[in-house]
Image (tube, rainbow, N blue to C red):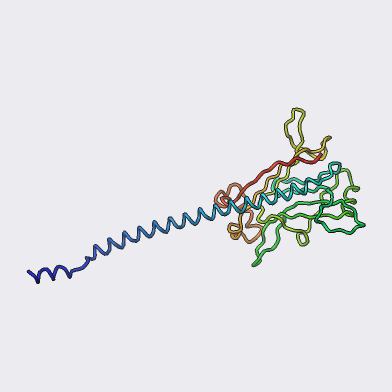
């Protein structure tokens, strides 16, 4: 009786039991890895939303502060495009943090535009730049025409203020006779009253997938829903000083 008991107690697990245990463990591991991957993806998406929101708020605050010193009697220069980012320039007063010679005037021109410039490892990305024209160039711009041509930017010298910019739309608007906003053009008989600005950006993690200017067209394509999952769009309407 004792011999039979020792013989049965030393048998251990059968092959079927071991295979069943491995299968169950594999299923549990796959489920855990799936949850971890989903959690990581959710975290990146949330972090991307927070970062892009913070960057857009900083831009709108900066742009509005710049716009608040615009001289109303001067022309508003804008260049709209269906396929490319817009450009906008306006004459303003010198800000307190701009260091200039005492003999120089206090007129300035701010130009906002998007251009591709090099990053690390030879990659390029689109950035929103701001260019500030001095008093002499601003005066020459004003005297050139009643509807002067928008100035040309220089990404090698100008400062980038927003990175990974997919779209920058600046649409001046005026009030119609019924009091509704409608598109404004340089040939309009009344000055613009509003600026509707739309900024589309993506985070650095998503931008790392695009190395060339042509590859960035993938994420700019509205039909490419997968690539545009990380794109954030922000729109704000600003009142122009009158």
Please state which of residues 129 and 239 is positioned toward the viewer in this rendering. 239
Q: Position of residue 79 (x, y in %)?
A: 77, 46
Residue drawn at (83%, 51%) of the image: 109
Please state which of residues 150 and 33 is positioned toward the viewer in this rendering. 33
- In the shown orientation, is residue 27 left or right of residue 181? left
Residue extending farthest right: 103
Q: Position of residue 90 (x, y in %)?
A: 81, 47
Q: Position of residue 116 (x, y in %)?
A: 70, 58
Note whether 151 is above or below 23 in the view shown: above
Please state which of residues 187 and 49 is positioned toward the viewer in this rendering. 49
- In the shown orientation, is residue 126 left or right of residue 32? right
Residue extending farthest front: 96
Residue drawn at (74%, 55%) of the image: 129
Q: Position of residue 135 (x, y in %)?
A: 88, 54
Total residue callouts: 0
Quadrant in the picture for residue 29: bottom left
Residue drawn at (91%, 48%) of the image: 143
Quadrant in the picture for residue 185: top right
On-image quarter of the N terminus: bottom left
On-image quarter of the C terminus: top right
């Amino acid at each position: 009786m004792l011999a039979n008991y020792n013989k049965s107690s030393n048998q251990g697990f059968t092959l079927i039991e071991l295979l069943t245990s491995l299968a169950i463990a594999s299923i549990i591991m796959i489920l855990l890895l799936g949850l971890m991957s989903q959690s990581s993806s959710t975290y990146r998406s949330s972090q991307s939303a927070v970062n892009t929101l913070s960057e857009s708020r900083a831009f709108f605050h900066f742009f509005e502060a710049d716009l608040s010193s615009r001289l109303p009697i001067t022309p508003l220069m804008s260049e709209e495009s269906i396929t490319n980012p817009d450009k906008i320039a306006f004459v303003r007063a010198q800000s307190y943090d701009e260091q200039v010679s005492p003999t120089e005037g206090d007129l300035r021109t701010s130009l906002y535009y998007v251009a591709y410039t090099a990053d690390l490892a030879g990659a390029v990305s689109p950035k929103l730049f701001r260019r500030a024209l001095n008093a002499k160039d601003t005066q020459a711009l004003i005297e050139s025409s009643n509807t002067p041509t928008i100035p040309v930017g220089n990404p090698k010298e100008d400062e980038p203020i927003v990175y990974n910019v997919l779209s920058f739309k600046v649409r001046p608007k005026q009030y119609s006779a019924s009091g509704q906003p409608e598109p404004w053009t340089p040939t309009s008989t009344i000055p613009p009253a509003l600026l509707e600005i739309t900024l589309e950006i993506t985070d650095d993690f998503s931008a790392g997938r695009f190395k060339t200017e042509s590859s960035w067209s993938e994420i700019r394509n509205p039909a490419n829903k997968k690539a545009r999952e990380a794109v954030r769009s922000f729109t704000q309407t600003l009142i122009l000083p009158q």
